Structure formats: structure tokens, C-alpha cells
Image: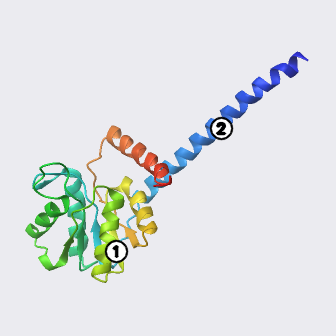
Amino acid sequence: MNARRRNPRRGVFGWTWRLLLMVLFWLAGVAAYITWVGQRDDARPADAIIVLGAAAYDAKPSPVFEERIRHGIDLYKRGLAPKLIFTGGYGGVGARFSESQVARRYALRQGVPDKAILIESLSRNTHDNLRQASLLMQQHQLHDVIVVSDPLHMARALRISKELGISAVGSPTPTSRFRTFATRWRFLLQEVYFFHRDRLPR
């Protein structure tokens, strides 16, 4: 009788422990998937290159954004697409330039012709970046794109592209400003969180 009274408690503890292990394995799997996608460069000829926005300081791109812009320009100069689409709105109250305008100025200084550049200045996050880019694609009859972002951001960017009906492949920046273990770990945890949050009803 005593053994029977103890069993339910052990059973609950055992199932709780198993559930916790399953959650940890799942989260580890998601993190591994995000990392794996970020290591793949599937760049191939396309109609355009979408460079996802990031912070800008007045007329100067942040180090993270500069890496994305430089990689997008490199893909353009390699002849992989005839158009660059820079995304990103105004970062805060009083900002003189949108992120996409900062990127455009940077690209012009690097010898990219103005006619090869499209921008949108309304977006505030990754989903908006890609939604606004999709509208530009429709307006200019562009059908497939290369998406440029940081490696650990690439899985989410490609998933959102698919949800929006954008035919896209990813080309993560070959270098990243998220270099230290601490910054990469925080970025990865953030992306694991967004992986699940994005599945909730908007």
C-alpha cells in the first residue's frame, strides 16, 4: 500500500523530467537548424538582391548594417543580380535618413549606379522589410531574389520570405559583427525565441 502511495509522486516527477528533456532537445534542435541555415550560402543568379535593414547612425550604417550592405554590393558586382533592394525605415524620432537611404548613399559611393538601386523607407522589422521589398518586386516585375542578412538571422528571413510568397535563397554575410561568444549566444537565443513567437497568431 505504501509503495502505491509513493508511485504517483514518482510518476509525476518522472514525466516532468522527461518533458523538460524533450523541451531542451527541441530547443537545441531549433538552435542547430538556425546555425546550419546561417552557414549555407545559396547565392545564384536572380532578379534582385534584398539587403535587410539594421541600425543606422544618422548618415552612417552601424557595423552590422555595413556588413550586410557590403555583402549585397559584392553579390551585385559579381553579376548575380541587376538590382539591389535596400530595406529599412527611420530608426527613431528625429532621424534624418532611413536605413535604406543610408544604404543607398553607401552603395552609390561604391560605384553602384542609381538605376540599379531600389529602396523602401517604411519598414520597422524583418517582416516589414520583406513585405515592403515584395511590393517593390511586384512593381518592377522581379521574380526571384537573394536575401542578405547576418548568418543567425537567415533562417527567420527565409521563412518569412516563404510565407510572403517570395522566391528567395539566402546569402549570409561572410563576416559578422557578432563575433564574441556572448554576442553570438545572445543573438542565437533571440532567434530561437522569434522562431516560436512568429508562429503565434499576429
Choose the circle earlier in sequence order: 2 or 1.
2
Asked which secondary structure carries label 2, the reply is: helix
Coordinates of residue 163 in the picture (x, y in percent): 46, 66
Q: Which residue is mark 2?
A: 19
Q: Which mark is residue 190?
A: none
Residue pictured at 25% horizontal, 59% vertical:
53
Check residue 145 in the rendering and tell me which mark sits there, or answer none: 1
Picture quarter with the N terminus: top right
Coloration mode: rainbow
Which quadrant would residue 41 be assigned to in this image? bottom left
Classify the position of the C terminus by image quarter.
Answer: bottom left
Q: Is residue 9 left or right of residue 92?
A: right
State which quadrant residue 60 falls in. Answer: bottom left
Give coordinates of residue 184: x percent, y percent: 35, 44
The residue type indicated by label 2 comes to Leu
Mark 1 surroundings: few (<14), some (14-19) or many (≥20) residues within 10 A:
many
Q: Which residue sits at x=24%, y=70%?
A: 85
Q: Which residue corresponds to the image point at 68% horizontal and 36% vertical from the top-left?
A: 18
Left or right of residue 21, residue 63 in this image: left
**Which image quadrant for residue 117?**
bottom left
